[in-house]
């Protein structure tokens, strides 16, 4: 059987189709159930499978495994962030705690790809925090002080050098950090599916509608069947709120991105034959742009509240126009209409950009809310929540728990009013960078 993977997302489209999947087709009992099979759930599944070889472990996902944000992201495995959403973290101690988590995240991805010999187009080429406004040099110089204190190798780069490295003269100033890795996110997610331990049963296209605690077990209701589990781990990230998990501490945001076809050799020569690169914005609502190994341009430059799992085609087409404009501004000589794929994806945010990692009740655990930086964190938090739920202690758990927890958010409708006004304001501030 050939299973059709999502053709609208450039990363997923280029993966070979899967050959078999199973959906939930009977009532059953298990020792562990993991909800959500992105980086977090797949990583939790791998760890639990290895820790408990004789337990019955079930992993479920509404869509095809890995086809949530985990295969739809921009592929930056970050060691440092200037913005994680809206908050610039200027407190050195807090920044160090955040960076320690990123470091542990990178290590856990590295360990996984080494152990299973995974090819995910790993490129330790660093990254640029770049702006088209020279006035942003001030922000970058302040950021540079933080990075210097914490010994992160970095430098400021200006227009002419940026033009040579990136093939566009759009950017006037950037801070280049040597750390930070670019990957193909879809290939990483697929490898995590392919290497799940044998005792982890994966059920896809199986949406958890309702769950409740009943007589010491957890009852999970799917479309026609029920699974009763001794323990549950929620790994649904942007959908935590919809399942009522830590409702006043996280909220979803929908991002959209587009990817072009590969540039022709003439087009590539015309932009100066740059190597693969990645640019993150200085202003939170600016564009993330990548030039990929196979000479495609990826752009992500919108973030909003959207109520459905995936954005409908009408709105997505409107967002595509914004992506097209962003590419045109940066590469005015490239032909119009080279965008091949456009997609949306859901991230999870908290007010203070902190993550969720906790036992929320007896036998009920949650890991997620990575505020747009969830590749390393997803892999790390997944395995560590499996360890925590198995009552193990690790150095990584201490690193994760050392950081402040997400802070309280106001209830609806005030929350959405607040988010919309903030997005509007940030978007206005970043209008030159979209
Ligand atoms: C456009 C975009 C760009 C991004 N860029 C980057 C980047 O460059 N670097 C970075 O580090 N991070 C980036 N991120 C964030 C990153 O992708 C996420 O933080 C990460 O994928 C989270 O992994 P996860 O496994 O926790 O969640 P997900 O991958 O979202 O997985 C959660 C899964 O839960 C499933 N699910 C939801 N509800 C239910 C239910 N009721 N029943 C069953 N299953 C359910 C979903 O189908 C989904 O597959 C980006 C995200 C987007 C959308």
Image (cartoon, helix red, strand yellow):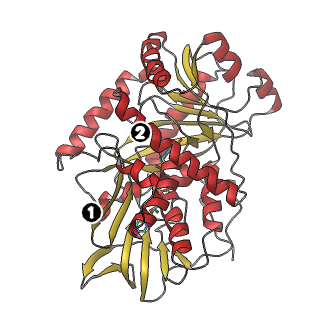
Quarter that holds the N terminus: bottom right
Question: Dot 1 surroundings within 10 Å: few (below 14), some, or many (20 or more)?
Answer: few
Q: Secondary structure at mark 2?
A: helix
Task: From this view, report whether residue 368 is shown above or below residue 205.
Answer: above
Residue at point 29% right, 47% down? Answer: 405
298 with respect to 346 (left or right): right
Residue at point 65% right, 61% down? Answer: 191
Residue 68: x and y in percent read 50, 57
Residue furthest to the right in view is 265
Q: Which badge, 1 or 2, is on the more N-terminal residue?
A: 2
Task: From this view, report whether residue 203 is shown above or below residue 329.
Answer: below
Q: Secondary structure at mark 1?
A: loop
Please tell me the numbered disc located at residue 345.
none
Which residue corresponds to mark 1?
A: 244
Number of disc labels: 2
Q: Nearer the viewer, residue 177 or 101?
A: 101
Residue 86: x and y in percent read 35, 33
Q: Nearer the viewer, residue 211 or 101?
A: 101
34 with respect to 257 (left or right): left
Which residue corresponds to mark 2?
A: 98
């Amino acid at each position: 059987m050939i299973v059709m993977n999502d053709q609208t997302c450039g990363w997923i489209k280029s993966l070979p189709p899967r050959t078999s999947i199973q959906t939930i087709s009977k009532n059953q009992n298990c020792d562990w159930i993991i909800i959500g099979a992105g980086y977090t759930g797949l990583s939790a599944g791998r760890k639990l499978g290895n820790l408990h070889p004789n337990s019955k472990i079930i992993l479920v996902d509404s869509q095809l495994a890995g086809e949530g944000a985990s295969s739809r992201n921009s592929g930056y495995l970050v060691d440092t962030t200037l913005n994680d959403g809206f908050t610039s973290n200027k407190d050195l101690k807090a920044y160090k705690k955040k960076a320690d988590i990123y470091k542990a995240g990178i290590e856990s991805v590295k360990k996984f790809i080494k152990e299973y010999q995974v090819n995910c187009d790993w490129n330790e080429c660093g990254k640029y925090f770049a702006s088209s406004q020279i006035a942003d040099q001030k922000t970058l110089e302040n950021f540079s002080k933080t990075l210097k204190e914490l010994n992160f190798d970095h430098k400021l780069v200006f227009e002419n050098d940026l033009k040579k490295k990136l093939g566009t003269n759009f950017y006037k100033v950037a801070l280049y950090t040597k750390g930070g890795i670019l990957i193909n996110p879809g290939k990483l997610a697929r490898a995590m599916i392919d290497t799940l331990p044998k005792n982890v049963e994966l059920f896809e296209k199986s949406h958890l509608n309702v769950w409740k605690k009943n007589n010491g077990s957890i009852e999970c209701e799917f479309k026609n069947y029920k699974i009763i589990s001794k323990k549950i781990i929620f790994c649904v990230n942007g959908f935590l709120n919809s399942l009522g998990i830590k409702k006043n501490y996280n909220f979803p945001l929908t991002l959209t991105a587009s990817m072009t076809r590969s540039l022709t050799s003439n087009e590539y020569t015309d932009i100066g034959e740059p190597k693969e690169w990645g640019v993150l914005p200085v202003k939170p609502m600016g564009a993330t742009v990548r030039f990929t190994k196979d000479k495609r341009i990826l752009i992500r430059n919108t973030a909003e509240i959207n109520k459905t799992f995936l954005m409908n085609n009408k709105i997505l087409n409107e967002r595509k126009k914004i992506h097209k404009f962003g590419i045109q501004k940066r590469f005015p000589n490239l032909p119009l209409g080279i965008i091949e794929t456009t997609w949306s994806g859901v991230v999870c945010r908290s007010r203070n950009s902190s993550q969720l990692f906790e036992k929320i009740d007896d036998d009920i655990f949650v890991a997620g809310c990575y505020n747009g930086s969830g590749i390393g964190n997803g892999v790390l938090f997944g395995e560590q929540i499996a360890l925590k739920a198995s009552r193990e202690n690790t150095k990584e758990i201490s690193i994760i728990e050392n950081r402040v927890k997400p802070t309280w958010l106001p209830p609806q409708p005030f929350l959405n009013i607040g988010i919309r006004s903030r997005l509007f304001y940030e978007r206005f501030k970043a209008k030159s960078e979209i």
